[in-house]
């Protein structure tokens, strides 16, 4: 169904089998202990689920984004943390490096993800959230390198990720602003890269979110990721590459909801009240129908966004399709997971079952990686063909009166 090929269905089945045997048994403990699941990471790498999308020339399988989406959904049904690892080890920062990195950078990044690393992307700062270009982390040119200073927070994988793609405002030796650039650093080899603290999160508790400080972090020239458009317009290209991650994040949300839905269907058949299975009540039947309808719509939008990468040589999914898919799937997931919990009654609220964890886990996807509000502005901008800068004066500057 949904237009998958025999090979794609086989991959989906292999991922489901892996999720059932390796991933599901540890999911509750990962949530409880708040520990990164290193054993699962090892198994994911051995099974070829990390670095799948890396081209064969760099040791990967050259898998499509749709392949990654199929794997991510199966992992997310069982364990959200595992699914996010698969996202970052196949989309996101790795896509940016594969698109714009030098040969050496591509080899290094490929080797890391193939060995199971989940690269970290460092954009958000305490005073630069949705307004990412307000970032103040700076990279000053000193001799043959850049020296970075600043702070980032809510960095997924802080303290466990090796590869870091850090966004900072670059300045030349005369202190002139070059624009925002991407800088690579590897934890363990970069003394100026410091973990400050870990956030206390609602969900996804096995995945550290942390604050990072860069204290005279030295980045040599060959660790600067430079898109062909150069410094001035580079940030747009780097962010575009990173946006592929939205397809992955939307898929995690959808997968968690799909997992919750499976539990709800089983429970509706098995739990009896008033002398009949609760699934016989039309109120719950319609709830299940709405849940599945939203899941199918989410899946189709995510598949379409994933498939938009590749044709005509496009290195990334279409930004508007990716944004729409993430808005829809992340908002639907919150409703579906909540309804699945509701359908379980008190049992759904108990930590004995995974429903309450799923509700907590899927809540972040309308926030991280561009909020649902900011993504709507992106979609509107594509519809209208206008730039929609959100500063008070930006709209006037970018859309002079009378402009079409
Ligand atoms: P704010 O920008 O302060 O927004 C507050 C509210 O205002 C939101 O509801 C927002 O939608 C709304 N808002 C803001 N501007 C507008 C506007 N123009 N129009 C309408 N509404 C608006 N960042 C990284 O760099 N790397 C990561 O790995 C990473 N991982 C994350 C993981 C999690 C679990 C979470 C929750 C966040 C993560 N982030 C990461 C940060 C994330 O990208 C930001 O939280 C997000 O961009 C929003 O920024 P903010 O939290 O500062 O909210």
Image: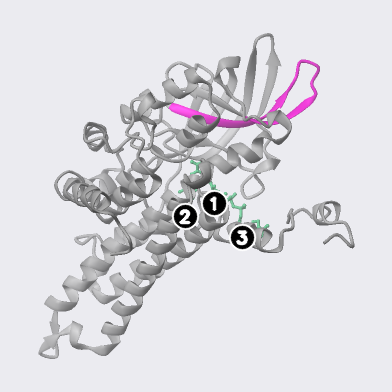
Magenta-tinted stretch: 163-181
Residue hosting label 2: 305
Mark before the other along the chain sequence, 1 or 3: 1
133 in relation to 302, above or below:
above
Mark before the other along the chain sequence, 3 or 2: 2
**Rendered location of residue 187, percent (x, y):** 44, 22
296 in relation to 176, above or below:
below
Disc ID at residue 354? none
Disc ID at residue 318? 1
Residue hosting label 3: 379
Q: Nearer the viewer, residue 188 or 377?
A: 377
Residue shown at 20% from the left, 48% from the top: 19
Q: Is residue 328 magenta?
A: no
Residue shown at 56% from the left, 56% from the top: 371
Can residue 220 be seen at all in this image of the molecule?
no
On the rendered structure, is 210 left or right of 284?
Answer: right
Q: Residues within 10 Å of mark 3 (few under 14, many from 20)?
A: some
Real-space Cα distance between discs 1 and 3? Answer: 11 Å
230 in relation to 332, above or below:
above
Q: Nearer the viewer, residue 210 or 70?
A: 70
Which corner quadrant holds the N terminus? bottom left
281 in relation to 40, above or below:
below
Q: Is residue 178 magenta?
A: yes
């Amino acid at each position: 169904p949904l237009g998958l090929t025999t090979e794609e269905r086989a991959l989906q089945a292999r991922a489901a089998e892996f999720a059932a045997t390796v991933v599901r048994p540890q999911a509750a403990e990962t949530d409880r202990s708040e520990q990164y699941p290193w054993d699962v990471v090892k198994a994911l790498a051995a099974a070829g689920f990390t670095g799948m999308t890396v081209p064969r020339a760099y040791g990967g399988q050259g898998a499509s984004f749709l392949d990654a989406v199929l794997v991510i959904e199966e992992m997310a049904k069982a364990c959200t943390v595992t699914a996010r690892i698969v996202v970052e080890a196949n989309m996101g920062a790795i896509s940016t490096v594969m698109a714009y990195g030098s040969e050496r950078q591509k080899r290094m990044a490929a080797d890391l993800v193939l060995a199971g690393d989940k690269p970290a992307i460092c954009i958000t700062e305490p005073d630069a959230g949705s307004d990412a270009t307000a970032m103040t982390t700076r990279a000053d040119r000193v001799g043959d390198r850049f020296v970075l200073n600043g702070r980032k927070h809510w960095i997924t994988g802080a303290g466990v990720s090796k590869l870091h793609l850090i966004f900072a405002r670059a300045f030349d030796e005369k202190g002139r602003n070059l624009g925002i650039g991407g800088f690579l650093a590897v934890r363990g080899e970069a003394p100026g890269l410091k973990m400050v603290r870990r956030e206390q999160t609602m969900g996804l508790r096995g995945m550290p979110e942390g604050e990072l400080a860069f204290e005279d972090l030295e980045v040599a020239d060959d660790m600067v990721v430079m898109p062909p458009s150069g410094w001035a317009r580079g940030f747009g290209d780097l962010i575009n590459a990173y946006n592929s991650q939205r397809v992955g994040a939307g898929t995690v949300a959808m997968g968690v909801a799909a997992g919750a839905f499976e539990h709800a269907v089983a429970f509706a058949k098995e739990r009896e009240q008033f002398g009949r299975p609760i699934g016989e009540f039309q109120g719950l039947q319609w709830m299940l129908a709405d849940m599945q309808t939203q899941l199918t719509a989410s899946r189709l939008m995510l598949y379409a966004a994933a498939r938009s990468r590749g044709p005509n040589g496009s290195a990334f999914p279409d930004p508007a399709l990716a944004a729409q898919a993430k808005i829809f799937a992340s908002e639907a997931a919150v409703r579906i997971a909540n309804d699945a919990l509701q359908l379980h009654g008190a049992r759904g609220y108990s930590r004995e079952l995974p429903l309450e964890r799923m509700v907590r886990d899927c809540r972040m996807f309308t926030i991280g990686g561009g909020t649902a509000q900011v993504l709507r502005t992106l979609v509107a901008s594509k519809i209208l063909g206008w730039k929609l800068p959100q500063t008070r004066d930006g709209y006037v500057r970018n859309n002079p009166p009378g402009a079409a």
